[in-house]
Amino acid sequence: MLQTVVAIVPLVFFIWFVAPALSVSSTWGNISNSAQLLHAENVAQGSSPEKYVEDEIKYPTNGIGNGRIITGIRAFDQVTNNTGGHATIYSGGPGFNFVHIKLQSQYNYGLIFRVEIYGK
Ligand SMILES: *[C@@H]1O[C@H](CO)[C@@H](O)[C@H](O)[C@H]1NC(C)=O
Ligand SMILES: *[C@@H]1O[C@H](CO)[C@@H](O)[C@H](O)[C@H]1NC(C)=O
């Protein structure tokens, strides 16, 4: 029994602390069950040798929003083999009616993200 625990503890620590750093999905704000999906976007960018690949998501896409306030945002990294990228909010976000998100790959790799923006 003790041996099993000793074997599992390092594994749990690995999953908690190491795995999130490799495949980075992010959530900002608060996505309640009653929140409405304001916008969803899938981004796929192939890798480029010796480069960081980037993409941007702007909501509202045409610059004219419907006045809805964003309550929460999720960026799902769809790459499961530890070569995925990460998402950063540049401006706006929860509490605002707009958001500008930047997606960046790891060096030499591509990006596959699904971003969902919720509001009320
Ligand atoms: C998130 O939403 C839940 C459900 O509406 C609410 O109870 C909670 O206070 C909210 N938390 C924040 C930090 O806004
Ligand atoms: C990792 O996964 C991505 C997307 O599924 C794929 O395009 C890429 O070739 C994979 N890379 C490696 C090193 O397996």
Image (cartoon, helix red, strand yellow):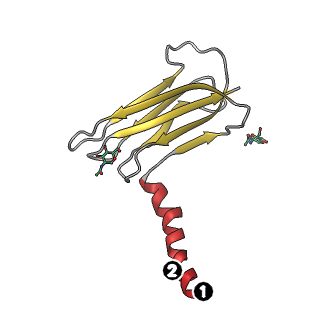
x and y percent of residue 81 in the render?
A: 37, 53
Q: What element carries label 1?
A: loop
The residue shown at (67%, 30%) is 95
x and y percent of residue 96 in the render?
A: 64, 27
Q: What element carries label 2?
A: helix
Say above or below: 38 vs 106.
above
User: Which image quarter: residue 32?
Assistant: top right
* Labels 1 and 2 touching (C-beta < 8 A): no
The residue shown at (67%, 37%) is 31
User: Which image quarter: residue 39?
Assistant: top right
Q: Name the residue under label 2.
A: 7
Q: Residue furthest left?
A: 49
x and y percent of residue 48 in the render?
A: 23, 39
| Crowd tier of the residue under label 1, counting other residues whose Cα lies within 10 Å: few below 14, some 14–19, many 20 or above | few
| Quadrant position of the N terminus in the picture | bottom right
| Quadrant position of the C terminus in the picture | top right
Q: Name the residue under label 1.
A: 1
Marks 1 and 2, how far apart at CA = 10 Å
The residue shown at (51%, 80%) is 7
| Crowd tier of the residue under label 2, counting other residues whose Cα lies within 10 Å: few below 14, some 14–19, many 20 or above | few
Question: Could you tell whether 111 is left or right of 47 in the image?
Answer: right
Say above or below: 17 vs 108.
below
Tell me which amino acid carries mark 2.
Answer: Ala
- Viewer-side residue, 27 vs 90: 27
Is disc 2's CB within 8 Å of ligand 2? Answer: no
